[in-house]
Amino acid sequence: MSLVKAPDNILIPTSKIDLDKIRNKQIHLFIIGHGQVGGLLIDQLIAEREKLKRRRRIDLAVVAVANSSTVLFDKDGLDKDWRSRKQEQGESYTIPQLIERAHRHGLYNTIMVDNTASPSFVLNYLPFIEAGFSLVSSNKVANTLGMEFYENLRERLAKRQQDYLYETNVGAGLPLIDTIKLLHLSGENITQIRGVFSGSLSYIFNRFSAEQIAFHKVLEAAIAKGYTEPDPREDLCGNDVARKLLILARELALHCEFDEVAVENLIPEPLRGLPTTAFLDDLPALDAHFESVRACCDKDEVLRYVATLDGDLADDFGAQMFVRLEAVPKNSMLGQLQGSDSIFEIYTESYGSNPIVIQGAGAGPQVTARGVFGDILRISERVSA
Amino acid sequence: MSLVKAPDNILIPTSKIDLDKIRNKQIHLFIIGHGQVGGLLIDQLIAEREKLKRRRRIDLAVVAVANSSTVLFDKDGLDKDWRSRKQEQGESYTIPQLIERAHRHGLYNTIMVDNTASPSFVLNYLPFIEAGFSLVSSNKVANTLGMEFYENLRERLAKRQQDYLYETNVGAGLPLIDTIKLLHLSGENITQIRGVFSGSLSYIFNRFSAEQIAFHKVLEAAIAKGYTEPDPREDLCGNDVARKLLILARELALHCEFDEVAVENLIPEPLRGLPTTAFLDDLPALDAHFESVRACCDKDEVLRYVATLDGDLADDFGAQMFVRLEAVPKNSMLGQLQGSDSIFEIYTESYGSNPIVIQGAGAGPQVTARGVFGDILRISERVSA
């Protein structure tokens, strides 16, 4: 092999490139939902637009912002005053009208960003795909419906060679789904995924295990910090953790449905049917149950609400999925968890008994919005100029 | 907003798509270096080729395998017998000849993968870029030369809209560089990066801190396990850790050079100039120094060889980079590290005082090869069909 000989200090003389002459890649964003995550995202996108043009030659224009009632559209991209403009100039719309508008203005490289939590909005994914949009979503619904919907969506995307990214569905801004997807696609045998997937349940059991304090006191603190849903039973029932586990399992091409996840509902039977206010008015009713659970722990153990995927993961139908309260060794990674962090352990053949561990804030509007931004950047790097 | 009404069980009837009619994306790989990492990578690529076509419509063909003396070329993609074929049919070559061959066969979507550790081979990156190749590299050299080379390389890539990925330069298969890059590009203010970046030094100080054992005994165990370079002073001098820290700092668009990293060389002065065999024959000569260091630790502290990036990271020239032996609290994330794991803490504004933590095997041929494979997949998703 003939090589250019390296001088002691390797420097190749080159003519300076005029970067201004390199064309920007135009990306047109349609943001649906501008609540906490959506609103922050739009602000972030607008704040970074100039820097991204300069650094990456990517021009991210927010051309539409919509919620369930109105849309604000600007083909050149909205600016910092989008909130007041939307209030004044927002128009009612239908999805076909929105798509038609993209076409009328000849917008290419279009991405629809779903920051709603709407169970029905995902029905609009298909018309957006057919109209040439890529998708980014922080909404978990499309990935937790039946396999038929799940696979149909992916086949449509494959057919049109469009992307659908949803990194924030699990662990907010933590790099989980991309990591698992790349490992799986590169043929790495993933043998188990395990962790504490919920920030609120992390906080609750980290404190409850570490301090001699009544369960309802810890729950009250979690509510006060805004870690739980308005009705904390939505966290305590385990369904949100189960949805995240299902999403990860499907990344491994496993055929599995929501009702196959064995979920331990942490709400004692008699309290499940109560109206929210009645439940919130009598939180000490939870104490007896959790006191008895804590009493079962050895002194070297702590309680964690753990999601586990294992089974014969090489078999399409081999997934076993558990979400349950477990006593884990204090000195394990899960046992050392603190605050409201989430933790994910990914076991694979090459990594052996020492998993890849990813830990950090797995929820919160700021980190979720950055995660959605990351997905938009990933797609932007894939589309052509 | 008018929505398609969702039935109770959301299922959209659709005609079945014939996925076989969707065209595969052809990718042509030129792999330079087929030692441990390169050889494993080629085997992995060949083993996964059919599955990737089926699952992602990506056809990864290894069309050239080269080392410093010969190349084996096959425009249709090599198969499992590449080792014996290379032995028999490998031809001597020059880089211009290799590039010319790609052109003669009309190969598009070409990626050059550098799995060498060669300091001079990186000079060939520019001709490959000019010839339309994207680059993937496990070789750290191109990212640790002077800023002039570093920036020139990126400007050339930007001009031609080609990619250069090197996830395995830091933390092997752990998702570090992509995570840091996306956070930075999305405007997240990264305030500090800190961790134990070396698997060998992790193992050495984890054991040395936990057990009352002579330093040379731990070092011998690390050598026996193959965790160190043949001359372990290459690990103990700290330069490899410093290179990784420099690479991460530059991901934040910081202007910084290798000689700005303050590196604590762990080899006592008198032992630095010895020939390798003389050094290896008298490892107990290291004991006195490390015994005195261990004696300085409080009982709640352990020793870790820590890399830290901080300073005013919003200022292009504000980076402060340290690589040194530190006494850290036993119950901190760094203090709890075990085995030969690497750990990386990424502090940002949104994540506050609880960093994103990524931990796992940060070295080893198997996990490094999977990491390179991941980079190839990332680029494959970006190029057009």
Image: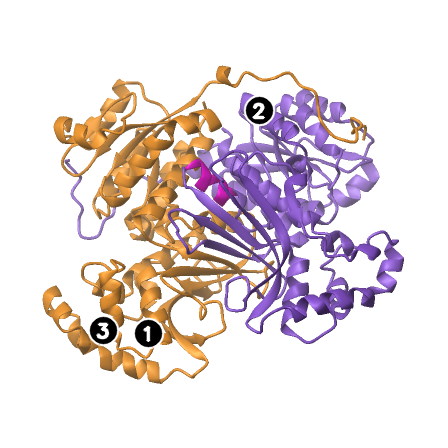
Chain colours: A orange, B purple
Residue that mark 1 sits on: A208
Q: Which quadrant of the figure contains the C terminus of chain A?
A: top left
Q: Amino acid at mark 2?
A: Glu
Q: Are marks 1 and 3 on the same chain?
A: yes
Q: On what subunit does the disc labeled 1 rest?
A: A
Give the residue at x 40% y 65%: A338
Magenta-tinted stretch: B178-186
Q: Mark 1: give few (<14), some (14-19) or many (20+) Cα within 10 Å.
A: many
Residue B126 falls left or right of residue A34: right
Q: Quadrant of residue B210?
A: bottom right
In the picture, the disc for residue A216 is 3
Q: Is residue B261 above or below residue B285?
A: above
Q: Amino acid at mark 1?
A: Phe
Q: Are marks 2 and 3 on the same chain?
A: no
Q: Is residue B181 magenta?
A: yes
Give the residue at x 63% y 49%: B368
From the viewer's side, name the closer residue of B340 and A115: B340
Q: Mark 2: give few (<14), some (14-19) or many (20+) Cα within 10 Å.
A: some
Q: Are marks 2 and 1 on the same chain?
A: no
